Each structure stands twice: as C-alpha cells, then as structure tokens.
Amino acid sequence: MRIRFAKHGKVRFISHRDVARAFERAFRIETLPLAFTEGFSPRPKVSFGLALSVGHESDAEYLDVELTDPVDTDELPSRLTPVLPEGIPATGAVRLAERAPALQESITEVQYRVATVDGCGRPVPEHVLVAAASGALAAGELAVSRVRKGKMSVDDLRPALRSIEIGHDGDAPVLELTLLTQPRGARPREVLDALDSFVGVGLSEHRVTRTSQWIERGGARLEPLAADAFAPVLETSAS
Amino acid sequence: MSNLWPRVEPLLARVEKPARYIGMERGSLRPEHRPSSTSWLLVYPDTYEIGLPNQGLQILYEILNERDDAVAERAYAPWVDMNAEMRAASVPFFSVDTHHAASDFDVLAFGLAAELVYTNVLECLDLAGVPVRAEQRRPEHPLVIVGGHCAFNPEPMADFVDAFVIGDGEEVVGEITEVVGAWKRSGRTAREGVLRELASIPGVYVPSMYEVDYDGPFIAEVRSRFPDVPERVDKRTVSDLGAWPYPKNQLVPLIEVVHDRLNVEVFRGCTRGCRFCQAGMITRPVRERPADQVRTMVRDGLRRTGYDEVALTSLSTADFSGIDGLVAGLVNEQEGCGNVGLSLPSLRVDAFTVGIASEIQKVRRTGLTFAPEGGSWRIRQVINKLITDDDLYAAVEGAYSQGWQRVKLYFLIGVPTEMDEDTLGISHLAREVVKIGRKYTKKASCTASVGGFVPKAHTPFQWFGQNSAPELQRKVGLLRDDLRRSGATIRWHDPEATYAEGIASRGDRRIGRVIERVWRAGGTFQEWSERFQLDRWLDAMAAEGLDPDWYVTRHRTDDEILPWDHIAAGLHRDFLWDDWQEALREHGLPDCRWTPCYDCGVCTDYALEHVVASAVPPAGGSQGTGQGLGFGREATVSAPVSVPVELTSR
C-alpha cells in the first residue's frame, strides 16, 4: 500500500526518522495488519521515499507499507490523520500492484517552492531572482563542492536542474525549482548557492516546501499514487 | 501573555534537534490562561530528551490541568546552542506548549533528580529574566518551587528557591494552587505574606522562614522565624496509589528520548533497605497499585499511544504481589497485536527473575542487566544487598543458557569499609561471568559498570565520608588492570564528577554561593562529561573559603546537626544511626514487608501502612523473608530492558 502525506508547520522540525516512527505508532493505534520482518528484531515493513530535510515542509510525501490483509484505502487517510502528529495529514492511499518498484528508486523528479532571503535576512526582490535563474539556466555547467565519503569532490549541478520559474506566495516572489533525482539529485540549498554566483546577494533559504514528486516511466510523468496502483480485474458481464 | 513562537522559529534553523523546542507531543495540552487561574510552568532542568519522559512532571501536568483554578505547561533546559541563540536574539526562557515567556507564569516549578543539574536551575531562571536569588525577587516575579528527591536536602539550593515540596506532589500542588490563587486575587502584595502561607502547608519548606546559626564550620541551630512556621517539615505521602492513576495520557514525543515507551508505575516505595539507596529510604512505605488498574493502564496506554513497548516501573518490580501472573497475563493479552515488548527495569538477581525475563523477552534477547552492587559477600552485607556469588552465577547461567549474550553488572565503589579485596571482587565476578557465558556462546560478553558512591541525606550512610576522587580513580585503576585480557570490559563514572556531586549532596546553605559561582563561570549541564570541569567547583569553594573535603570526605559523628535534620522523611534518626552501626558490623537487615516492623518511623509516625496485595513474599525467595539471610537466596537486581539510546553522558 502507498500512502501520501503532507508535512506543514512546526512539525517540519522533526526528522525523516521521526516521521517514520510516528507512522509506525499510528499504524499500531489503528491496528493495521502490518507485515513484519523476520529475525530477532521484527520491524514493520515500511519504506519511505526521498528524505525531506529537517525544517522543510512538504505537500506530497510518500511511504509504502506492506500489510498481511487488504484495508479500505479510501477511508484510510481519515483514520490515520487524527492519530498522526498535527501538521502531518494523510492525503491519499492506494493498494499497490504486485512487485511495484521501490519508492526511493522510482521517483525521478521533485519540485520545491523556495522563499529566499539575502545575506542580511531581507526578502530578495523579484528581478534579482529572475537574473539568478536565467544565469543558471544559461550556464553549461554549475560546479558544486560536496563531501562524499570523507573527500571533497566537485559535481556539476546543471543536469539536475530541469527548470526554475518565479512564482508568488501572496505578494512575495518565490523560486519554483524542478529538479531531477537521477542519476544524482540536488538540494535546494545547493541550487541557491549556484544561483547566488550570478547575483552575489547571499541568497539563502527562508522557507522551503516540496510541492510535488513524480515518476517518469515510458515517457509519461506520473503521480506516485497513480503510478503503481493495483488495477483490479473488472468483472465484465455479458449484457 | 504573548506568544514567542514567531521569535523562536527563526532560531530553530540554526540549532541541533530543533524539535526539542516545538512541543506538540501526543497528549500535550495548550491550556488557555485566564486571570483567575494559577499558572504553573513545570521545568525539567536538563535536555528535552532526558526531561520529557519524567513521570513526576507528567503526573503533575495532568493533575493541575484537570483543575478549574490552574493551568500547567512544560519547559526543558535549552541546550547550549539554543541558549546562545536565545540570548543573542533576546528571546527569554519559554514553555514548549504555547511558547509563552516563563516570567509570565505564577509558579516556576523545577523537578530535581540529581545534584549536578543545580546550576541549570540558575541558568533557566536567568534566561527567564527572573533574579536567581530568592531575596531579590519582587511581587511581580514568579514563585520558584522545587520538588523531587533532591528536595530532601534543600539547603544547597535554599538561596534560589522560594519553596520546596518534600515528598509526593499529587495532593500538595492543589493546596499550593489555592494559596497562590488567593494571593493573586488580593493583588500580589509582598512576597513574604504568601511565602508564610505556603510554609504552613504540610510538606512545604520555605527556606527564608528559617534561620541557620553556625558554630565554626558546624551548624549550631536551625530555627523557624515565626511561631506558625513549623520547626520541622514532614514529607507528604500519597497513601493510596490506586486513587492516582496518572499519567492517564502519557506524552508521546515526536523525537527519540530516553525511556521512549509506555511507563506504568506499579508501586511506589521500597523496604528492601539497601543502605546506599536514598530513593528506597525516602519513598517508604510500599504502596502497590491494584493489579487490575495496572492492566487497564497498560491496555489503554498502548491503545492510545501506539507504543510497542511498556515498562512496569518501581524500585524493585519483581516484588510486586503476583508479578508472575501479571506478566503472563499481559504477555498473553498482547500476543497477536503486533509484537509489544514488556520490560521490567528493576528485577532481582535470581533464577525466578531470569524466568520472568525469558517469559517476556521472546525476541530481542540481547542483553540482561544485574546489579549486585558489591564485589564481595562481606561488602554486600555492609550495604545490605544480600546476593551471594552463587545467586549471581545461577542468574547468569540462566541468562546465557536461554539465549542472552551480553550481561551487564552494576557496581558501586567507595562504599563503607571497602578494602581492595572487595573492589577486586568486582573483577573476579566479571571474569567468572564471562567464563560461564563462554560455555554457551563464543559471543558471551560481560560489562562491569562502576560508579563511585555518593552518600545521601536520610540514609544510614549519611554519616560516611565519601572516597576522594584520587582514591576512586585508584580503585578504577585496580579494576582496569585486573580485567586486562579477561573478556570482560569495565565502564566507570568520572570520579571528579562524583566528587562535585558529593559537595552538593550533603551541602548546607553556604554551598549556595558555590553553585552560583560555578554557574556564573559558565558551568551548566554539569552532568554531561564534555561540559564538566572539577576546577570550577574547587575554585568556587576556595573563593567562598570553604574546604571541599570537609563536605565530601569527612565522616560525621552522631552528635552533629546535619543540614537536613529539620526535614523529615519519616525515618527516625536513631533507626538510621543503628542501621549505620549494623552496617559497620556487617549485618544485613531483612525486608520489613514480610517480617516484623523495625520501627523505622515512617508507618508509625504517619499512620500509614504498606499497601500490598499479598503478604506472602514473592516466589523464588526474597531478601527479608528469612530464607535469604546467611545464604542470600534473594538478591535484588535491576534488569533487562533494551536501553533506547545512550543520551546521558555518563
């Protein structure tokens, strides 16, 4: 079964692992028929998608959980939401197809809405964002330094940047980032550093929301609940 | 009152574990403050992860919020990084429930479980903008109240605290609420009036109502300043635990904390009489919760919280009347609903106990913990922990043979009459335990965890001169050398921190200035090894002209007035002194639950009785049943339990 949920407000300060534990407790409160791993420390078979950074909000997070018996997926969100932490509503659930691919490997594209501030903590004007975005999109390569396995390495961020648009949250201009996750993703923080190299205002995150995640398969761009949903065999009648 | 959240929120992006400061736990409340209600801020002056599970705080949080005339919120000491951010942004100490400033509350109530957190109380007050010294507070400032086991020697904190609550808090918080409420309605005039009112509540000690005279370094007299203020403050005791089924809505934290599980207190008090154990002495008599209520609290608690583990807590859970039946019932009831684990954090060292452990730990059989406390039979008679070597070996044999691979043993060093052969008995036991384990598995391991003994108020050892830090270090060295290449490992507490704890543990009012100096020098979170420096304490003692060894390593005599003699835990001083002399004669004292009364004073003076469902000693034998003395058939243990995360530094 795949469940979609959001993460908003104060609860954005809990970690990915904390969210996992909150779901496990919610499943037990609602006595879902969980499947457990074998061995000395049986754990419920739950797998999460791409981790969301502590402090970031999300409109669309996903997890897969294996059950021993089917449950009514239509009513599941309204059962789970009251027993999940405030700010983490369950917003959808589907029964998965047999042998659906793992969530984490499936996601190919994520979108973020990023409200920014400059080095002095002031909102960044729209024309500066526009200049930064067009600079980055026009660049052939965007070098970013990363620590990997204890060593510094320089990666090119540009392939992960599918698009940058300027949107609005009320009156405030925000960046709408569409980022590819394969073969190597990028964090909003890294994208802002790269953008700042074109405007030099000390661009940094004020508030970040993951707005959607997508699975690209056979040229189609699918919402993760729809992508691997179990398709019941419809009984056709003779009439 | 204003909500500080908009000013707190921007700081959280820059600190570790920001969820420490957001509240929102399942079971938490956002009470509405009204002018007519007395507002309490319940503070645990350590990190959120250590403080959140505290059952005392959670019990009072519920009891106060159920009242029409009170509201209660919670706060925990912000970690060093958050503290610095708050000071830089002028954000004061706040509640996690509604993010209101601490100084807006009527009462700031601190729960103190260990002496090394004392400096954190001062830090919290200062961060709240409240003067740390009680005498400097004005009517608009909150009342500062302290409870918890440390209140049984209140004197080192007397300068900073308006009132201490001695003993169980369930009933007295209501009485305090009424006094504070009346003071508010009358327009919050001078503090002295309300403090005098508080001092007349049984179990409440208001240090400013008492004068201390000294004769050189010794206390000459402690007397109350007014005729209506009692000369001696007796502890409060809830006689029927069944009447207080709290917490009903145990908080479920959003981040990992210590003891992260459902906790159900099955009894309070202990009469085993371990002479080093302050908790066992000051919480008498034994009051069991009815077994049916325990079952209900477990069932409802699991259903409400979604936890997959429940602990039955007390000072010695295997002594609960009919524990085997209770455990079997709980295990059977939980079967089929998803692997709920049951843990008993305090068991005994015997085969019966291992039997219970194997009953409840069908899976996750990794480690078992026993607490023989002393390395030799002789020293265990001195401390009244009557476990023979054979008891321990039988328990360990049972554990390894039934699939456990790691055994952890808790010991104290630096107890009265200890000689090197007693200390080395610890490494001898550890080696033998490894030998037994290797018969069953190559992976068998044994860890000896060694803590330096700090004498505590209201115990038979309150007169004993603690070992110096170098002496404890020498003993640790003996054990380390002796355990080389033995297969057993040793862990120990920092003897220097043990020494500092000794300063505060039996300190008098003059130690208050020392605590203030340590705090002003930056000494907060002293129970965290990376934050502790003994020199801060020694420098502060020197600056105040006080000799630390006089407080820590000196033996007291029978005629000395002890700083806590005007606080009564119900134990007769004669009883404690006689028990101290019995200890020096290496005599054990059976448990009075199942033997005639020794007149320690608690039941007789307070017209209380042990509340136990069964007057028959627990199966498997027990200290105090008579069958144990001489052979040590029983033996107490603290037990298994999968320890969640090691958050404490030592």
Image (cartoon, rainbow, N blue to C red):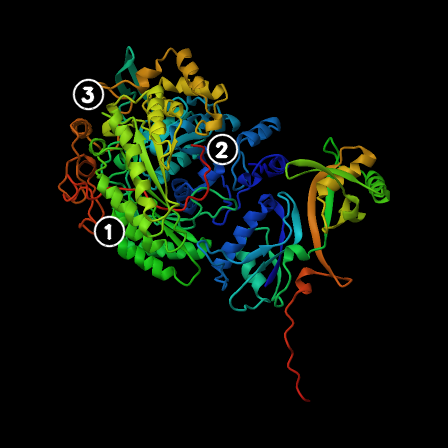
Question: Which image quarter holds the C terminus of chain B?
Answer: top left
Q: Which residue is mark 1?
A: B321
Question: In terms of sequence position, does the residue under pointer 2 or pointer 3 come before the other?
Answer: 2
- Nearer to us of marks 1 and 2 is 1
For the residue marked with disc 2, what is the amino acid? Ala
According to the image, label 2 marks what residue? B77
Image spot of residue B211 (x, y percent):
31, 18
**Residue neighbourhood size for the residue with mark 1, other residues' Cα within 10 Å, grouped as few (<14), some (14–19), many (≥20):** many
Q: Mark 2 to mark 3: distance in Å?
A: 40 Å
In front of the other: B574 or B485: B485
**Location of residue A108 in the rendering, given as x and y in whole percent from the top left corner:** 72, 55
- For residue A14, side relative to residue B618 (left or right): right
Instruction: Reply above or below: A156 against B457.
Output: below
State whether residue B523 is above or below residue B449. Answer: above
At a point 59% along the width and 52% down the height, the residue shown is A88
Q: Is any atom of residue B131 visible in this view?
A: yes
Q: Tell which residue pokes out farthest to the bottom in this image.
A: A239
Q: Earlier in the sequence, mark 3 or mark 1?
A: 1
- Name the quadrant of the N terminus of chain B: top right
Left or right position of B471 against A111: left
